[in-house]
Amino acid sequence: MVTVPRVNPQAGNIAGAAVNPVAGDTGAVGRGLQQAGNQLTQLADTVHRSQVKADRLKANKREQEFLTQLQQATAELDPLADDYDAQVETAINETIEATKAETEFRTGEVQSRFAARLENLGQAQVREAFSAREAALNDQALRDYDEQRQQLMANIAADPQGADVFLAEFAADVRETYAGVLDQSQLETLAKETAENALVQEALGFAEAGNMRTARAVIDDNAGDLDPSMARSAKATIRGIESRKRAEFARATAGELADIRIAVSRAETPEEIAAARERVNDANERGLFRGRQGTRAQLTIGLDKQQEAAREEAAAREDRNNRYLSGTGAVDQRDADAMWEEVTANATGEGEQLDPQQTIDMVADFAQQTGFVPSPIKQNLQRAERMLGEQQLAFAAQQYQTIRNVAPQVDVGLDKGSAVRQTAALVDIGTFDTHAEAATYLANLSTRDQNVRKARRDAFEEEAGVEDLTDAQIAGRINLNPLGTRVPGGRQVVQLPEGARQEYVNTFKQNYLVSGDVDAAQAATDKYFQERWGVSRITGQDQAMRHPPERFVPNFDSLLERPEVRTRLIQDDLRQSLEDANIRVAGEDVEADDLPRFSLQADERTEAEVAAGEVPTYRVYARDEAAGGAMLPVTVIRRDGAIEPMRYTPPSTKQEVTSSQAWRDAVDRESERIEQMRERRLNREETGAPDLREKAAANREARAQERRALDVGDAEAARERVTEVLRDIPGRLPKLDQDELQRLEDNVQPFAPPGVTGKMIVDWLRNVGRGIRERSEERTRENQ
């Protein structure tokens, strides 16, 4: 094992001198010793260099660790502390000593160099720490300055008129406080910014105080001292404050102005008008009409008109009173009603009422004086007529009779057959002694009539009721025939929608309750449904619906008499509406799919629009791909973000129709059809071929003449034809079941005149058969 001694670079020379003390000896032994000494010197140099290299690497690593420890030690200190310099010196010295104690090198050269390096790094960290302290002190000074500046702005905003004083005090305080802390350039920059912000804040303070003119003047007068963008921003802020102030003022005064408007509108007497005028003037003095001079003028004009109307009403009231007292009479019913209000007001105090007999006598005297019965009295008489209460009816009859006794020519607003007049007549002719007895008799009689009416209704519902009608019969009665059917009311009908049957039955019963006549109720029900129901082909199939949109397309051209043209117009328009709403209908690209793409549905809003004479709107339904192709209601998003159902309005003007592609296509197809007809006509003229269309037209005319002969022109022949077909039917009708009756109705329908159905004929025959049977049974009983 070779032990490497710890030597210095001069060790080899000393050894060589000791071994070969005689200089210049060139013997073999001397040369060997010299060579060995050289080798030992080289070995010592190599060992020394490796140790130095290792120590330097170690020193570099320890320096980095030492630097990190220094930074951590100084970072934990508060740079704003009063003894910050002592804290920094202590922390650095402790870190240096600890690092020296913990670090040992094998070479003295690196050891001394490392100690010097630690001292240098410590001095550098001291300088860095004091630079950080200076920056921290500067930042703290800026924060303090900013807090003082914010307080300055708050003072200016609260009292913009003292802005100059506040700014001067702030500048003096800054010079005294920050002259030795912040450098001159910083102070100049901050002073300029503070001055600009102070000007803006002064203007905004005036604006918040409501002085917009001064606020704008502050910005305009100091425009040269302000940055252009800051001036523009300040003006925009002033405009925003002005708008906000106006809105706040409007909200704050809206309630009081509303009360003033109500007071003005309700002012009728001179005292009330004067009080309302005083409120308007007071509000004007307090500035409530600032920016609302139009409102003030409107209220003032309204009060002037009401004052003039009050004077005119007072004069009219005096004229009516004079005419009433003189017996001249009233001009018309309105004039009489005004007289009656004044008479009753003069006859009663506040909160008082006349007793019944006083009212009867006063009304009679009034009718004699004016020639009119007051409208409120007429309404009371009519109300008693409707209610048929015994007490009300008796009082109304007594009042009516008293009026007739003193003023028989006066109109009391009652029909000749009214219960009130009948009650008075029963007393007048002596049937009853009092109006109460007569009223009791008529009330009971009315109850008996109602009971008879109910029994008749119940019997109708059991025997001939509309409940027996099939869906197909109802659809036929209301003309739910497929589009393109030439003769409405035919046997081919569209399926009745769900719920329509029950609606038909309920409507029929209601009409029967009103009329008490089966035929009249049936006709009224049919008309009601024909006006509201129809057939639409919007989905591509004939479907019954309320208020079909095809009805509302204007008919300004013969082309629009064709149902398919109207349907195509609405279909194309609806597709465009869905595309405009960014709604893609499922299945549009699948030609083989016959399912409907979209549909329209009438709702309560549609009913209201039709009733008001407006063009109706419909709820829109479309096939939804996400829902598996199901028909779902379409919704749209409004601009305010709200979601609402989509509604469709069919084209209702000539311009809307003619601007659509469907109309242009229809016109092109019609032009092509006319051109083809013209070519065929020319060909027939050249070849002499028979005109099949002319033959078909002749056949149709012949059939039409035959129908007219049966329906109108020769009614007797029609009756004979029906009698021949149904000669033996009346006697068998009671024995036929429902299916046989239906077939019979279908068989006689072709012979029915216009407006008459097969069921009506069969019902008539059933009555005839019932009469024949009853007469036959009566003869049998007589013979027995």
Image (cartoon, grey):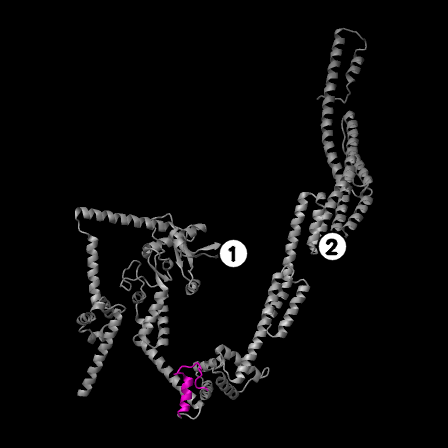
Asked if residue 15 is positioned above or below residue 209 in the image, the reply reads above
The answer to whether residue 3 shows anywhere in this view is: no
Which residue is labeled 2 in the image? Answer: 158
Q: Quadrant of residue 564?
A: bottom left
Q: Is residue 531 magenta?
A: no
Q: Is residue 420 magenta?
A: yes
Which residue is labeled 1 in the image? Answer: 642
Q: State yes or no: discs 1 and 2 in contact (Cβ < 8 Å).
A: no
Q: Is 402 in front, or is 661?
A: 402
> What amino acid is at disc 2?
Ala
Percent x, y of residue 742? 25, 68
Q: Is 437 in front, or is 622?
A: 437
* Callout in the foreground (1, 2): 2
Percent x, y of residue 312? 57, 74
Looking at the image, tell me whether mark 1 or mark 2 is earlier in sequence order: 2
SS class, disc 1: loop
Q: Is 406 in front, or is 588?
A: 406
Residue at the spot 33% in from the left edge and 79% down from the top edge: 456
Percent x, y of residue 737? 24, 72
Horizontal placement of 190 versus 401: left or right?
right
Q: Which residues are magenta?
A: 407-429
How far apart marks 1 and 2 lie (CA) works out to 42 Å
- The quarter of the picture where the C terminus appears is bottom left
> What amino acid is at disc 1?
Ala
The answer to whether residue 376 shows anywhere in this view is: yes
Tally the numbered discs: 2
Asked if residue 652 is positioned above or below residue 504 in the image, the reply reads above
SS class, disc 2: helix
- The quarter of the picture where the N terminus appears is top right
Tag 2: Cα neighbours inside 10 Å, few (<14), some, or many (≥20)?
A: some
Q: Quadrant of residue 108?
A: top right
Horizontal placement of 495 versus 702: left or right?
right
